[in-house]
Image (cartoon, helix red, strand yellow):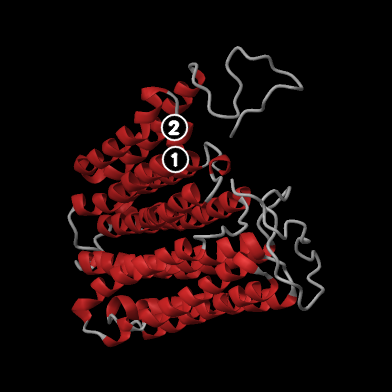
Amino acid sequence: MTSPSSHEGAPGPDPAGSRAVRPMTPRSRHEAHRVASPLELFFDLCFVVAVAQAGRELVHAIAEHHTADGLVSYAMVFFALWWAWMNFTWFASAYDNDDALYRVVTLVQIAGVLVFAAGVPEAFTDHDFALAWTGYAIMRLALVTQWLRAAASCRGAERRMALRYATGVLLCQAGWAALLLIPEDARPWVFLVMVAAELSVPAWAEHARESAWHPHHIAERYGLFTIIVLGESVAAATVAVKSAADEHEALGELLPIAIGGLLLVFAAWWIYFSVPIHLRLRGNRQAFLWGYGHYLVFGSAAAIGVGLEVAAEQATGHAHLSARTAALSVTLPMALYLLTVWALHARHAKRGRAQQLLLPVSAVAVLCCTFTGSRAVLWAGLVAAATIAVGLWLGRAGHPLPGEPPRDAPHGPGAAADTP
């Protein structure tokens, strides 16, 4: 871990938010009991609207046999959502002072999220990114304001870092305007260029000085957003259950989708939160790879819900797709989720070849369920549930997870507590 910030003694946020303006000095990486603030929770909640909007549009695209086009649009829209969320999250972890001005600027960012969400349908159906770009610009300009505030309160390398962030965000936002001006067939290539530019800004800004983000706080914030995107999948499973209740003639097709979908979502939650990760986030080298890789974690988790809705629509005859295509819309994102969570998150706590291979093998098994016909989602859910059971058995068979006492360790007031 890098050395603490020079403003390590700066006070935390004002609990009452009573002061209109306070110096935006960095918070301590060693601050005790650091948790997500109510404003951060509200910020995440408003992102649900945009994530759900993108998911609904992808469902329609797949159902209308525009899968490739829908996936490209979904990747672009979800990147913008994820990147705006991530930029705010890491900034808030380092500089949240909870004064009135900070709250107002954050609420402006939330307004930008809602404008962006309103522009998602046009981005999918007409490839018109004007409204989405406007919402993104509102979010990003508000972030620039926050970084300029931080620069005004800091000195030396910390100030240069904040100014680099502000400059990089402004330049990238100007670059995104190309999506409004260039021919449609060139937009995916511009998107890839802009993704590379956006991802390089933090590395450039923090080359000489790391921001004072808090490891436990960052891990919690990512966990909360994981819950949000999994919540969209729970909603999709609920739709399948409701459809089963409303359409009795399709009950036999929809109930397996509902049961399998719930098993998949429950397993996705269990696997992500089975081990703590904040102890590995000691510096930017580990944290950047982990943070960037969550684009695939969040995107695949949200896509599981999309797949469940597609499978339900296919089962009721509202989407003219093959059963295998509908199944693949569920099994493929679930397999990707298992692999990315293993690569970024879970493998660091695994001991022995059996534990290390469990999630990759499970991902392959889930993909194989695609070929089991109309019961593919149910079989995938059962494979996911079996993965949890085997993982628990391996953990209790002499390979405890970090934080767990060995089987023969003494239990008592001084013994370590089991991890969830």
At 34% from the left and 65% from the top, the residue drawn is 196
Residue 179 visible, this orientation? yes
In the rendered view, would you say 262 is above or below 383? Answer: below
Mark 2 or mark 1, earlier in chain: 1
Label 1 element class: helix
Residue topped by disc 2: 388
Q: Is residue 218 left or right of residue 341?
A: right
Circle on res. 88: none
Disc 2 to disc 1, how far (Cα)?
7 Å
Point out residue 259 in the picture as x, y percentages from the top left corner: 40, 44
Q: Out of 280 and 53, give the one closest to the viewer.
A: 280
At 35% from the left and 54% from the top, the residue drawn is 308
Label 2 Cα neighbours within 10 Å, binned few <14 / some 14-19 / many ≥20: many
Point out residue 282 in the picture as x, y percentages from the top left corner: 56, 45
Q: Out of 94 and 38, give the one closest to the viewer.
A: 94
Point out residue 70 in the picture as x, y percentages from the top left corner: 26, 68
What residue type is disc 1 on?
Answer: Ala
Q: Out of 369 and 126, give the one closest to the viewer.
A: 126
Residue 260 visible, this orientation? no
